[in-house]
Image: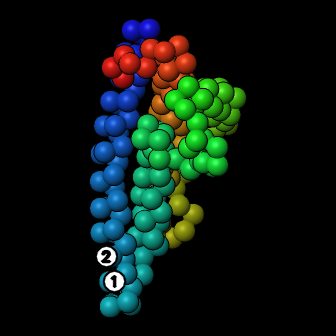
Amino acid sequence: MKILSNYILFVNKTNEFIGKYSSWLTTFMVLVVVYDVVLRYAFNISSVGMQELEWHVFAVLFLMGAAYTLLKDDHVRVDLFYSKFNEKQKAWTNFVGTLLFLIPFILIVIYTSANYVNNSFVLSESSPDPGGIPARYILKSFIPLSFFFLLLQGIALLFKSILTIMNHSEEKI
């Protein structure tokens, strides 16, 4: 049981770190949007690169925040029954949902995105628009990377559910 607890602690700390530092991208994104809006409406200057940077930063923020969101249990859930469950019932629900839905979905995304990202690197893919951002493959590499961290957090949730089901939830996690 100690190994499960250690794994949970390690992954939680890792995703806590990634989530907290990724959240600073929100500030950067706001600054980029404000800069773009001021240029566009005050000086009638528009930049494709600036607009692409906005959605690139948003994509990285969204992707890298997914594992942190699962860690904090702030993801979208249909709470019709779950909120009325006791801790063991919640643990069983999390265990089954993680095992049957979350982990297989993550593995499919990682598997299917690997070739997509590899092709992007091989082609040195950049924006097709004039003035767009080069090195689009960097953005695409965040897809499997973020889902890897989500997989680690999903396994941590699975282990935490096992500990709760086995009445070991009092261990420091």
Instruction: Work out which quarter of the rendered image holds the C terminus and state it.
Output: top left
Residue 167 in percent (x, y) is at 48, 15
Q: In this view, does 11 lie above or below 123?
A: above
Q: Can residue 7 be seen in this view?
A: no
Left or right, 102 with respect to 14, comes to: right
Q: Where is residue 129 in the image (x, y as percent from the top left)?
A: 54, 68
- Label 2 environment density (alpha carbons within 10 Å; few <14, some 14–19, many ≥20): few
For mark 2, give the secondary structure. Answer: helix
Vertically, is 34 above or below 97? below
User: From mark 2 to mark 1, how far is it between C-alphas?
Assistant: 6 Å
Q: Which amino acid does label 2 sit on?
A: Tyr
Disc number for residue 35: 2
Classify the position of the N terminus by image quarter: top left
Identity of the residue drawn at 30% across and 61% down: 28
Please give the label number shown on residue 39. Answer: 1
Q: How crowded is mark 1: few (under 14 residues within 10 Å), some or many (20 or more)?
A: some
